[in-house]
Image (cartoon, rainbow, N blue to C red):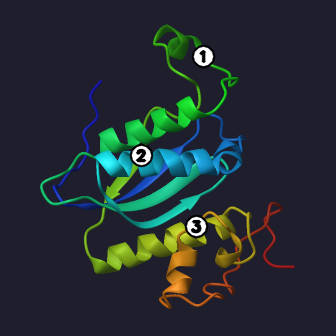
């Protein structure tokens, strides 16, 4: 089956990429290896990272591709492959993946959204940065170490207490304390 994706040369995209095991914390346990895989791919297939957050079992990123380049799929395939090769095998692998010689680390596909305008970009950057709070990994977005929010804070674009008053339900569905 061939999946149709909206592609535009030089486009800006928001991505969600998940591990196959959504109860895993592999991405934060091996964040150094993930960062290296991204650096390696960027050297051969450049792109700008506008925002990124790495959570235990999924990641969100916003990339701007170079003019005349629309190939984000190859970049993700190379990042996923590079990361997978850098960590020790041991994950459970279903029969379909075994037949194809695949590891069982990543979900096969990813979700992408082409950014339409500045407002859409701003909303998605906010979404990336608030995600650790939304998922209960941090009280404030700036508390999460694996986020581009720190670059935004250092440059003065965001305050360290940005969105500190956002109140997401906890695991029991209750708000706040």
Above-or-below relation of 55 to 155: above
Image quadrant in which you'd find residue 89: top right
Cβ atoms at labels 2 and 1 below 8 Å apart: no
Depth check, mark 1 against mark 3: the one in front is: 3
Depth check, mark 3 against mark 2: the one in front is: 2
Q: Which callout, 1 or 3, points at the residue further toward the start of the chain?
A: 1
Between residue 81 and residue 116, name the one nearer to us.
81
Depth check, mark 2 against mark 1: the one in front is: 2
Above-or-below relation of 145 to 72: below
Q: Residue at x 26, y 44 (%)?
A: 5
Q: Residue at x 78, y 75 (%)?
A: 175
**CA separation in Å, label 3 and label 2:** 19 Å
Task: Indicate the secondary structure of the residue bearing disc 3.
Answer: loop
In the rendered image, which residue does mark 3 sit on?
A: 147
Query: Quick one: quadrant of the N terminus?
Result: top left
In the rendered image, which residue does mark 1 sit on?
A: 94
Q: Residue at x 72, y 41 (%)?
A: 23
Cβ atoms at labels 3 and 2 below 8 Å apart: no
Disc 2: CA contacts within 10 A as few (<14), some (14-19) or many (>=20): some
Between residue 85 and residue 143, name the one nearer to us.
85
**CA separation in Å, label 1 and label 3:** 32 Å
In the rendered image, which residue does mark 2 sit on?
A: 40
Measured as percent of width and height from the top left, residue 65 is found at: 25, 58
Above-or-below relation of 81 to 94: below
Q: Which callout, 2 or 1, points at the residue further toward the start of the chain?
A: 2
Above-or-below relation of 98 to 130: above
Q: Which callout, 3 or 2, points at the residue further toward the start of the chain?
A: 2
Measured as percent of width and height from the top left, residue 167 is found at: 71, 79
Task: Indicate the secondary structure of the residue bearing disc 1.
Answer: loop
Left or right? Give the position of 44 relative to 140. Answer: left
């Amino acid at each position: 089956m061939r999946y149709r994706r909206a592609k535009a040369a030089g486009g800006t995209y928001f991505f969600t990429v998940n591990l196959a095991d959504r109860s895993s914390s592999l991405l934060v346990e091996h964040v150094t290896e993930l960062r290296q895989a991204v650096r390696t791919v960027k050297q051969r297939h450049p792109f700008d990272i506008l925002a990124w957050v790495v959570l235990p079992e999924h990641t969100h990123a916003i990339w701007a591709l170079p003019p005349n380049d629309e190939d984000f799929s190859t970049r993700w395939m190379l990042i996923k492959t590079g990361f997978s090769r850098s960590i020790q095998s041991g994950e459970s692998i279903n029969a379909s993946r075994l037949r194809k010689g695949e590891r069982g680390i990543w979900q096969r596909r990813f979700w992408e959204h082409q950014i339409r305008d500045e407002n859409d970009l701003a909303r998605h950057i906010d979404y990336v940065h608030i995600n650790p709070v939304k998922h209960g990994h941090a009280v404030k977005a700036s508390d999460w170490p694996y986020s581009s929010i720190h670059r935004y804070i250092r440059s003065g674009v965001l305050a360290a207490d940005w969105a500190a008053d956002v109140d997401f339900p906890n695991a029991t569905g209750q708000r706040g304390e």
